[in-house]
């Protein structure tokens, strides 16, 4: 995985030119999709306006930054006119206070995409697991997540 600093340099704030405006809550949080391709999604959530009562990032904002990449990964690998993603479970472990913007570099391997594709085509549904690290601008892991996502036929 690239270091957070190199991700910031590689994907400046508006690099992807994509706003997550379908979800008003996500839009208000300032979450940015910095990069999206088959098997990879990079998002950043800024500290402002997501500061809590003690000056660190609000836990709900960190949760949002962790949940969104699963849907972005799905959209980059599977036809959305046939299937849709939904999160079934997301466990988050807070490791350190986030006092800067936070980055998530989510990955889904080609083998996992192939397995999910086969399940979707055979059963109209599929399940996959996604583990992630949320890191601040210094590379400190501020949270880790384990998520269960589902792809379902329309």
Image: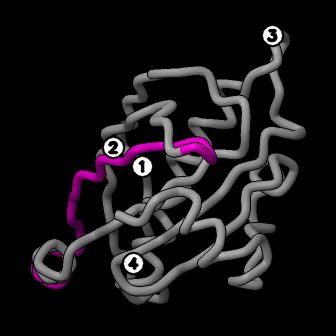
Q: Which residue is mark 4?
A: 83
Q: Quadrant of the N terminus?
A: bottom left
Q: Tag 1: Cα neighbours inside 10 Å, few (<14), some, or many (≥20)?
A: some
* Side of 49 relative to 7 (left or right): right
Q: Which residue is mark 3?
A: 54
Q: Nearer the viewer, mark 4 or mark 3?
A: 3
First reached walking from the N terminus: tag 2 or tag 4: 4
Mark 4 lies on a secondary structure that is strand
Circles 4 and 3: CB atoms closer than 8 Å: no
Calculate the distance from the C-alpha at mark 4 to the C-alpha at mark 3: 41 Å
Q: Tag 4: Cα neighbours inside 10 Å, few (<14), some, or many (≥20)?
A: some
Mark 1 lies on a secondary structure that is strand
Circles 2 and 1: CB atoms closer than 8 Å: yes
Q: Which residue is mark 2?
A: 147
Q: Who's the residue at 40% across and 75% down the image?
A: 40
Q: Who's the residue at 31% across and 58% down the image?
A: 150
Circles 2 and 4: CB atoms closer than 8 Å: no
């Amino acid at each position: 995985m690239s270091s957070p600093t190199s991700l910031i340099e590689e994907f400046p704030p508006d690099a992807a030119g994509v706003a997550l405006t379908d979800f008003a809550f996500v839009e208000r949080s300032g979450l940015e999709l910095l990069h999206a391709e088959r098997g990879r999604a990079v998002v950043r959530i800024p500290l402002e306006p997501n500061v809590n009562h003690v000056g660190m990032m609000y836990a709900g904002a960190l949760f949002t930054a962790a949940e969104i990449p699963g849907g972005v990964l799905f959209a980059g690998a599977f036809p959305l006119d046939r299937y849709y993603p939904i999160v079934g479970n997301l466990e988050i472990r807070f490791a350190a206070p986030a006092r800067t913007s936070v980055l998530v570099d989510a990955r889904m391997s080609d083998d996992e995409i192939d397995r999910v594709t086969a399940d979707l085509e055979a059963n109209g549904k599929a399940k996959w697991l996604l583990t992630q690290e949320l890191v601040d601008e210094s590379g400190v892991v501020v949270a880790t997540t384990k998520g269960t996502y589902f792809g379902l036929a329309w």
